[in-house]
Amino acid sequence: QIKPEPNPITNGRPLHLLVLEDNAINQQLLLELLEKAGHMVDIFDDPYQALNALDRSRYDALLVDYHLPNMTGVDFVLAAREIGHACKVVMMSADISDELKRRCQQHNMDKLIIKPFKIEVLMRLLNPD
């Protein structure tokens, strides 16, 4: 008997995700797609508010835009790690420079995904099995 292929968008267990993205359109798109996939999503446009949220909630993964007001996404992740949060990190950026790739590798970001990306690609990064 042939089993249907799993849907890559809804594959895996539901995750609690922190999304740090300062663009309102990207926020809405990520919120709708991630919630449709069954994930619980907290979205922030301010890195300091997102850092405060890390004190109140446990997250399975952080989806962080690289270009943020007041700090870079890498700086946000380093600050989050400094206060004891060490979950999976997916850095999001439209920047495809070698400098950004090097900086993400240097600071052990789990994944770098280049915008625009397909939701299926993001889901595979979040649920690799």
Image (cartoon, helix red, strand yellow):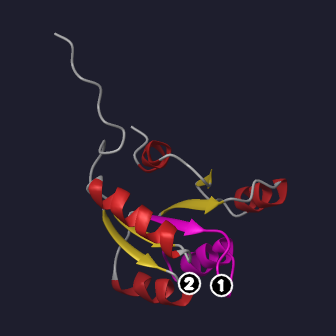
| Magenta stretch in the rendered image | 61-85
Q: Is residue 76 magenta?
A: yes
Q: Residue at x 38, y 69 (%)?
A: 59
Q: Label for residue 69?
A: 1
Amino acid beneath label 2: Pro
Q: Is residue 105 visible?
A: yes
Whether tag 2 and tag 1 are in contact, CB under 8 A, the answer is yes
Q: Secondary structure at mark 1?
A: loop
Q: Quadrant of residue 46 in the image?
A: bottom right
Q: Residue at x 59, y 73 (%)?
A: 77
Q: Is residue 87 magenta?
A: no
Q: Is residue 113 left or right of residue 129?
A: right
| Quadrant in which the N terminus is drawn | top left
Q: Secondary structure at mark 2?
A: helix
Q: Is residue 121 left or right of residue 71?
A: left
> Mark 2 sits on what residue?
47
| Quadrant in which the C terminus is drawn | top left
Q: Quadrant of residue 9 in the image?
A: top left
On the image, the x and y values in percent for residue 86 come to 50, 68
On the image, the x and y values in percent for residue 57 come to 34, 79
Q: Residue at x 50, y 64 (%)?
A: 63
